[in-house]
Amino acid sequence: MKKAILTLTVAVAICFTSFGQAPDGFTYQAVIRDAANTVLINLPVGIQLTILQGGASGNAVYTETFSHTTNAYGLVNLEVGTGSTSGDFSTIDWTNGPYFIETAVDITGGTSYSVMGVSQLLSVPYALHAKTSESVTGTIAETDPIFGASVAGGITAMDTSYWNNKLGIEVDGSLTNEIQNIHSVLIEGNDAGLNSLTNIGRLTIGSTDETPGAALEINSVQGALLLPRMTTNQRNALTPVEGMMIYNTTERKFQGYCGFDTTILAYSSIGLTDAYVYDDGFIQDYPAQSFQVSEYGILDSLSFWVAEFYNGFISDGIYIEVYSGLPNTPETFLAYKYITINSTGKYTISFDEAPLLSTNTDYFFVIKPTMPFKIGWLSVLMSNGATPGEHPYGSLWYFDCDMVEFEDSQTEDLKFEIISGTNGPSWTDLH
């Protein structure tokens, strides 16, 4: 007689006889194969299932047989508890496990069964044991000593309905300022004390309608917005943030705190190629940029853009020197700054002693090495011939180490900005 190889999945799903109730059985699925591992498709088979208590060779407490036909995939779907039985399925004590299920098959469809295997039932006993809750009556006493000694153990049904009854020691002396009463703080005439309202997306006062885009709206024909009122000394004691507004009672002025105002006095924003800053002790190569300013102003800062750098600049650094006049002519030194280069991109430097710049006057700045770079070099962004520089009153100059003088490119500019600070951060009168 051919033997069968059984491929099975036990307790794939619990079979509920009615929704919300524990089951009187469970679903069993198996794939039937013969000794050659061939799936037996659309063939009648006899199956005997035996539930064993205590172990894989334990006592048989229930036996059930089925005559079933495999489907197109060799699969049989059985509901344990509904076949031809030997024993009472409902009397199995699922708390007294473990339990195993023994599977025997007759692939000819008869009753000459051959045992194919034994598998332990893991989750099924717990699901079936849940059915015993149907017969529970009365109340269940909580006997857990840990729970009984905890604060939660003293909570009664009355406490859950009137939770304020469970307030113990009131540390701030008030029983009405707790979070459950926060709405009462917002009622007309009530005092919020030192409480704060946070995370409010929009606030509308005096209207039930919201205006899109308005974070705060006051709708009133009987009242006005009253800004904080303070003396000059009180104002100066604040940590100001740009955009603050107050009414100064000392000066009788509405005032706002403004940030640092800047003006770009000269610039060129074209940066399509680069100019080198180089000094190996024999050859020197570095640029200068001449310019005129559009209005009077203090030279607070100067910006330029580093395109590339290689070796030497973190330790050696460069000088930015500013002069009045033009390269190769008698010039007057105005300011300088030493910096190190450790990345590409924009560099904005300020000067310790910022000179005053006047209109209709030539100035220039130089980006030069502080000492020979050994094997290092630096390049800064500039315009190219196809797209000349944007500054109409100056140009890029190159230092010629052979001639020991600068050569004027005439049409090119470094990418640069000359920046003047017209007003520093301060309180400003609004009228």
Image (spheres, rainbow, N blue to C red):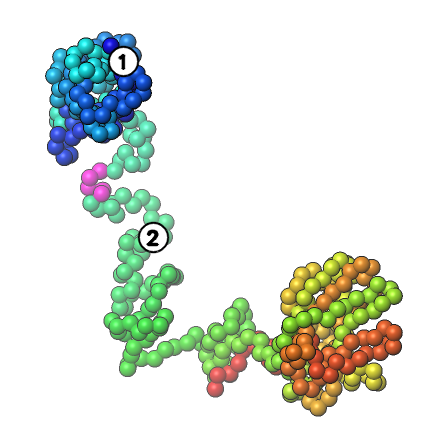
The image quadrant where one finds the N terminus is top left
Q: Is residue 110 visible?
A: yes
Q: Whole-percent x and y of residue 2?
A: 26, 13
Q: Locate residue 120, reporting x and y percent.
A: 29, 18
| Disc 1 secondary structure class | loop
* Tag 1: amino acid: Lys
- Residue 316, quarter of picture: bottom right
Mark 2 lies on a secondary structure that is loop
Residue at 43% from the left image edge and 74% from the top image edge? 228
Q: CA distance from mark 2 to mark 1?
A: 84 Å
Residue 245 or residue 82, whichever sits in front: 82
Q: Residues within 10 Å of mark 1 (few under 14, many from 20)?
A: some
Going 28% across and 34% down the picture, which residue do you hit? 153
Q: Which residue is mark 1?
A: 3
First reached walking from the N terminus: tag 2 or tag 1: 1
Horizontal side, residue 273 vs residue 232: left or right = right
